[in-house]
């Protein structure tokens, strides 16, 4: 469920772009006006605002925001294709940056169409659990079996496989991965599995990690809040409070400041 509060009748993207342009004018900029617009529009609306702004004023909105607003309050080209945003193909970047089993898994995962409904076949679940156990028992990890199952199966199916594996072999599937897989491949498999088991718990833990210790992992914090605000932030906030004994809003408030803090808290919604 989205935590972004959108007006019942939002202004047109063109009107929003004009308001943002006016906020840039004069000495300094009206940061409150910019936050009020961008934090109360969904990703599609923000994308349209960006397109209108760049058409009308022939400058990149992202760069103007970066130059006008101090700190970490920066808006990327949300929901645009990876190629448009980065300027390269995702597959090419994976080819150049990853290697071995890790690369094979990532390429398979992004190129496979998966059914993501709640239904799954219990017989196939049991067969997958057996296949993974057999693969993990061999010298090293039989990567082909893990890559196929983890890239082709739905989240509901993988969660069921995890439960089935535990019942059949008296140990978590994640432990089999941890014992046998190489570091990057292990991390990718564990990430897919943890998201399948509980997406909210996975992101709550990631947010905690981003804000724990000295300093804050700002890129991770921004990425998670912005991308999950319209999907399942209510669930993530509930999981965060349950697991860590404080609200996510309070954690963000204590670890950030200025426009950066204001924008993130606006996306998080009410503090409960």
Image (tube, rainbow, N blue to C red):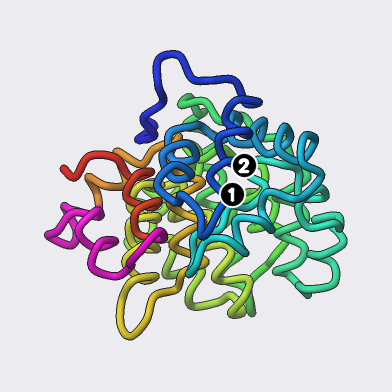
* Location of residue 196 with respect to 5 vertically, above or below: below
x, y (%) of residue 92? 87, 61
Q: Is residue 145 left or right of residue 33?
A: right
The answer to which quarter of the image holds residue 183 is bottom right
Seen as rendered, the residue at the extreme left is 245
The reply to whether discs 2 and 1 touch (Cβ–Cβ < 8 Å) is: yes
Is residue 242 shown in magenta? yes
The residue at 63%/58% (across/down) is 146
* Location of residue 80 with respect to 249 vertically, above or below: above
Q: Is residue 249 left or right of residue 121?
A: left
Q: Which residue is mark 1?
A: 25
Q: Nearer the viewer, residue 135 or 256?
A: 256
Badge 2 crowding class, 10 Å Cα cut-off, few under 14, some 14 to 19, many 20 or more, is some
* Location of residue 100 with respect to 268 vertically, above or below: below
The residue at 49%/67% (across/down) is 70
Q: Which mark is residue 21?
A: 2
The residue at 73%/69% (across/down) is 101
Q: Nearer the viewer, residue 199 or 67?
A: 67
The answer to which quarter of the image holds residue 47 is top right
x, y (%) of residue 37? 47, 36
The answer to which quarter of the image holds residue 135 is bottom right
Q: Is residue 230 left or right of residue 95?
A: left
Badge 1 crowding class, 10 Å Cα cut-off, few under 14, some 14 to 19, many 20 or more, is few
Which quadrant: the N terminus?
A: top left
Chain part drawn in magenta:
240-260
Is residue 20 shown in magenta? no
Q: Is residue 247 left or right of residue 33?
A: left
x, y (%) of residue 190? 50, 63
């Amino acid at each position: 469920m989205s935590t972004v509060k959108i007006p019942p009748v939002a202004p047109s993207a063109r009107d929003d772009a004009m308001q943002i342009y006016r906020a840039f004018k004069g000495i300094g900029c009206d940061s409150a006006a910019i936050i009020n617009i961008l934090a109360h529009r969904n990703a599609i609306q923000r994308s349209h605002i960006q397109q209108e702004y760049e058409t009308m004023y022939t400058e990149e909105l992202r760069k103007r925001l970066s130059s006008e607003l101090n700190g970490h309050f920066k808006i990327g080209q949300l929901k645009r294709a990876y190629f448009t945003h980065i300027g390269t193909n995702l597959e090419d970047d994976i080819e150049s940056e990853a290697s071995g089993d890790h690369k094979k898994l990532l390429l398979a995962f992004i190129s496979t169409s998966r059914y993501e409904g709640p239904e799954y076949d219990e017989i196939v679940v049991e067969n997958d659990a057996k296949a993974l156990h057999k693969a993990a028992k061999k010298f090293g990890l039989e990567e082909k079996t893990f890559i196929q199952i983890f890239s082709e199966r739905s989240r509901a199916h993988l969660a069921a496989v995890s439960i089935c594996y535990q019942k059949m072999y008296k140990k978590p599937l994640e432990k089999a991965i941890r014992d046998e897989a190489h570091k990057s491949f292990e991390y990718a498999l564990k990430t897919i599995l943890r998201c399948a088991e509980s997406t909210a718990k996975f992101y709550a833990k990631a947010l905690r990690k981003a804000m724990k210790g000295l300093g804050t992992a700002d890129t991770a914090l921004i990425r998670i809040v912005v991308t999950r605000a319209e999907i399942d932030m209510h669930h993530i906030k509930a999981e965060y409070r349950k697991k860590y004994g404080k609200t996510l809003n309070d954690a963000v408030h204590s670890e950030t400041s200025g426009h950066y803090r204001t924008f993130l808290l606006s996306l998080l919604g009410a503090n409960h």
